């Protein structure tokens, strides 16, 4: 209140009137306005993604990124982003159709651009892994600094099962998730005996140990890595170029569609966990373990559930990643990659499902495209991330406070 008073006479009243006008602007939109806002936001995100992926000229790319940042700021200030979020709550099926249409539009425009489709698939893979980290960190409060290790577990599982030719690739992909989850159940034992930073250190040590194990193990290819065959599902070889209505697509379109479908399934699953009584109990564990135990919650059980579930998601996507790239090596699963995954969760907004997708586009795509500043691009990129977190400490899309009851 002292800050408001320092603004002069009428400061609090002016502030409240501005907030009230903005809220009334959002409420006046109604169903049609919310859906229209969703269409606008989805179109802006799709166009931004296509532009950044397709533009090769570095100067034009820099101008494009600046324009995208300005548009995003304007959409947020005008309340359009908030209205789109409300549409997702009140009209989920309409928003899902809009998202599918935007996804199809991006795929159609980039249909013959191998690099763009590969980057799109990679973004979806990282976003899906970060959904698992969202369950662990955002819902339960478990910081996992070994995300890349569980991603690698799924990848190497797919590589080793490639020798079993009669095993369907769907089973291979699921096996990657199961092995990662099983490995996570072993790691959860020391994690349960510690709290806070010490639990995070246990996962950090495991990630470093995993990388060293891959480097020294000749059976797994050592530093040179392993070749991995592509995916074949229901007789369709993903190395083939699909054709739809006389329009040919790059073979990477197969992987984009598959990974997009997996991402959608896990998004729905994460939403179910968050909105169910499971999510309430996970929130209770995150906020106060002692109080949760007093009220009868089995803290160790729900921590194990979150940790195992998140690692399963990472393992599944690791298997898909290995088959898509056709090659894996220890250098693909370093501690730096684990930090990248954690930074995506923090930047997107801890606990926000949609935030990880937007943050992944920034964290994964921009360093790859900002080649015009060469060795300084990671320094500039880090400064941008720090600046964003300074302006929005809760992340780009902060998680909404859970509300109980109502009329």
Image (spheres, rainbow, N blue to C red):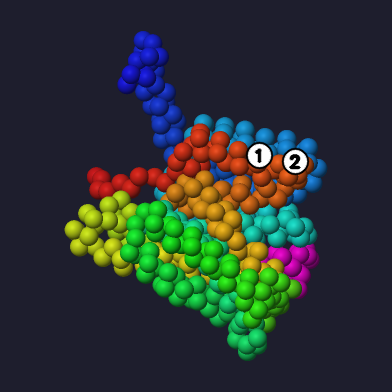
Q: Residue at x 57, y 72 (%)?
A: 213
Label of residue 380 in the image:
1
Q: Is residue 402 left or right of residue 387?
A: left
**Viewer-proximal residue among 85 and 255:** 255
Q: Residue at x 62, y 77 (%)?
A: 217
N-term-proximal mark, 2 vs 1: 2
Label of residue 16 in the image:
none
Say which element carries label 2: helix
Q: Position of residue 232 (x, y in %)?
A: 67, 78
Q: Position of residue 300 (x, y in %)?
A: 30, 66
Q: Is any part of residue 294 visible from this angle?
A: yes
Q: Residues within 10 Å of mark 1 (few under 14, many from 20)?
A: some
Q: Are marks 2 and 1 in contact (CB under 8 Å)?
A: yes
Say which element carries label 1: helix
What residue range appears in magenta? Answer: 240-257
Q: Residues within 10 Å of mark 2 (few under 14, many from 20)?
A: few
Q: Is residue 351 above or below residue 239?
A: above
Label of residue 373 in the image:
2
Q: Residue at x 40, y 53 (%)?
A: 197
Q: Quadrant of residue 2?
A: top left
**Viewer-proximal residue among 71 and 196:** 196
Q: If the image is split into quadrants, where does the N terminus sit? A: top left
Q: Residue at x 36, y 19 (%)?
A: 4
């Amino acid at each position: 209140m002292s800050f408001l008073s320092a603004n002069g006479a009428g400061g609090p009243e002016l502030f409240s009137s501005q907030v009230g006008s903005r809220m009334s602007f959002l409420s006046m939109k109604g169903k049609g306005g919310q859906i229209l806002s969703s269409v606008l936001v989805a179109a802006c995100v799709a166009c931004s993604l296509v532009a950044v992926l397709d533009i090769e000229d570095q100067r034009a790319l820099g101008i494009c990124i600046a324009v995208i940042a300005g548009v995003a700021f304007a959409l947020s200030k005008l309340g359009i982003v908030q209205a789109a979020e409300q549409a997702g709550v009140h009209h989920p099926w309409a928003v899902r159709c809009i998202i599918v249409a935007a996804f199809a539009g991006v795929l159609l425009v980039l249909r013959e651009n191998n690099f763009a489709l590969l980057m799109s698939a990679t973004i979806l893979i990282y976003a899906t892994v970060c959904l698992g980290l969202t369950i662990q960190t955002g819902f339960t409060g478990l910081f996992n600094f070994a995300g890349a290790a569980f991603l690698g577990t799924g990848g190497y599982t797919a590589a080793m099962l490639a020798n079993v030719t009669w095993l369907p690739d769907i089973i291979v992909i699921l096996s990657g998730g199961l092995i990662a989850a099983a490995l996570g159940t072993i790691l959860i034992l020391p994690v349960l005996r510690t709290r806070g930073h010490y639990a995070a250190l246990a996962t950090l040590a495991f990630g470093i140990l995993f990388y060293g194990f891959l480097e020294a193990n000749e059976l797994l290819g050592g530093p040179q890595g392993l070749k991995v065959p592509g995916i074949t599902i229901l007789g369709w070889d993903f190395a083939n170029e699909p054709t739809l209505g006389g329009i040919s697509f790059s073979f990477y379109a197969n992987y984009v569609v598959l990974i997009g479908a997996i991402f959608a399934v896990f998004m729905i699953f994460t939403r179910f966990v968050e909105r169910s009584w499971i999510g309430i109990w996970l929130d209770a564990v995150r906020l106060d373990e002692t109080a949760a135990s007093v009220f009868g919650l089995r803290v160790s059980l729900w921590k194990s559930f979150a940790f195992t579930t998140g690692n399963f998601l990472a393992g599944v996507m690791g298997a898909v990643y290995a088959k898509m790239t056709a090659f894996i090596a220890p250098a693909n699963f370093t501690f730096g990659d684990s930090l990248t995954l954690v930074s995506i969760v923090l930047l997107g907004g801890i606990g926000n499902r949609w935030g990880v997708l937007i943050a992944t586009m920034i964290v994964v795509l921009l360093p790859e495209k900002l080649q015009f500043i060469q060795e300084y691009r990671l320094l500039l990129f880090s400064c941008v991330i720090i600046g964003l977190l300074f302006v929005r400490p809760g992340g780009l899309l902060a998680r909404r406070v859970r509300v109980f009851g109502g009329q």
